[in-house]
Amino acid sequence: MLAFFEKELVQKKKWLTHEEFAEGVVIGQLTPGAPIVNTGIFIGYTLKRLKGALATVAGQVLPAFFLVLIIAYLYIKYNDIALIRSILKGIGAAVVGLVASVVYSMGKKFLTSYKSISFAVIAFLCLAIFKLNPIVLIVISGIGGLLVYREGRL
């Protein structure tokens, strides 16, 4: 979804800059709830204020809600069929590839200095090896960003 959003909103329609899109992704990650929905709400609000935010909620949540209900029903009814299990394994692998694509795309844009690369590597290690709570990691990273990147006095 993030790759689709970025391609449509930043590259094709040019409604947002890469920086605005990235800010939306960060805010989507920081706020409670599904990050992609939160990102969409931020982008909708940025473009059309309250009406845009409400439209993105309706456009993202309602179709997904009904689709999940249908898929859940079909899964429960037909999950013992080997063909269905094979299809789901293929979809699962493709989703990993899609996420990796977004990570690669965002990495090219934001990992441009040893400082930003250090933040990314340390965050990855803290999550993957030390199992640090993501919320704690975000707070620590924000404080670290303030100390490392701030310009002038507060």
Image (spheres, grey):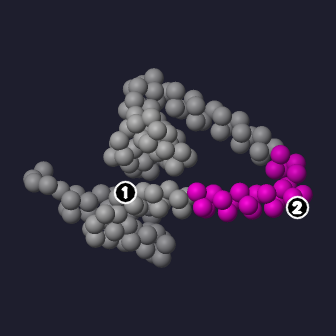
Residue 63 sits in which quadrant?
top right
Residue located beneath label 2 in the image: 82
Q: Residues within 10 Å of mark 1 (few under 14, many from 20)?
A: few
Q: Amino acid at mark 2?
A: Ala
Please say whether residue 77 is one of the residues in the magenta stretch. yes
- 80 vs 57: above or below: below
Mark nearest the camera among 2 and 1 is 1
Of helix, strand and loop, which one carries label 1? helix
What's the distance in space between the residues labelled 2 and 1, CA to CA?
A: 41 Å
Q: Residues within 10 Å of mark 2 (few under 14, many from 20)?
A: few
Q: Amino acid at mark 1?
A: Lys
- What residue is rendered at 79% in x and 57% in y? 87
State the mark number for residue 109.
Answer: 1
- What residue is rendered at 45% in x and 23% in y? 51
Is 72 in front, or is 135? 72
Q: Is residue 138 left or right of residue 37?
A: left
Identify the magenta region.
74-98
Of helix, strand and loop, which one carries label 2? helix
Is 46 in front, or is 14? 14
Q: Is residue 112 left or right of residue 153?
A: right
Please say whether residue 124 is one of the residues in the magenta stretch. no
Q: Is residue 12 left or right of residue 96?
A: left
- What residue is rendered at 30% in x and 57% in y? 142
